[in-house]
Image (cartoon, rainbow, N blue to C red):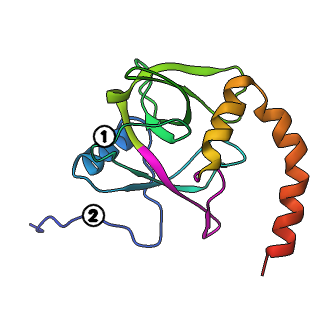
Amino acid sequence: MQKPTLFAMRGRDLPLSGQALIGLMEEVLGKGRPFRFRARGGSMSPFIVDGDVVTIAPFSGSEPSLGQVVAFVPSGSGSLVVHRIIGRKGRSRLIQGDNLEGVRDGWIEAGDILGRLTRVEREGKEVRLGLGPERILIAWLSRTGLLSFFRQWAGPLVGIFRKKTAP
């Protein structure tokens, strides 16, 4: 009989979703380590797009704060969600996807948030937009319903800037 070995895949994705993904993430974060996975969906576009590789890190004693992008499992859903904190009341956080104007996840207890997004990689390059100090402005724009207007206005400017700075 073969001796069991640790399963690892280098250079390829290990397809996990639902409870398997959530369980593995909880175990890794519970050990104080960051967790990387490929994001699916468009609810955080343009800051996170379908197929981006995201890194979620544990809070390590700090509290989830305004503008942070966090991972959580909405009660009764069994699905992992990665959205932005747009409000705070006591230990509860109001959470919404950046591309879901008016559709909020609702108030989530800080203790029910699994971790915070620390890195986004798109096509092998790091994406910082939406994770720095501007995250607070994005949260405010999202909460007031102005984020979609701002994206339409600023989108062409960002595109011009990217073309000028691209290698």
- Quadrant location of the N terminus? bottom left
Using the rendered view, name the quadrant where residue 9 is placed: bottom left
Residue 7 lies in the magenta stretch? no
| Position in image of residue 36 (x %, y %) | 43, 56
Is residue 141 depicted above or below 162 in this figure? above
Q: Residue at x 70, y 20 (%)?
A: 102
**Mark identifier at residue 23:** 1
Q: Is residue 4 left or right of residue 25?
A: left
- Segment tinted magenta in the rendering: 116-132
| Position in image of residue 15 (x %, y %) | 45, 52
CB contact under 8 Å: marks 2 and 1: no
Badge 2 amino acid: Phe
- Quadrant location of the C terminus? bottom right
Q: Residue at x 67, y 36 (%)?
A: 98
Q: Is residue 17 left or right of residue 52?
A: left
| Residue 37 visible from this viewpoint | yes
Of residues 79 and 135, which is closer to you in this image? 135
Q: Which residue is mark 2?
A: 7
| Residue 42 visible from this viewpoint | no
Is residue 20 depicted above or below 32 in this figure? above
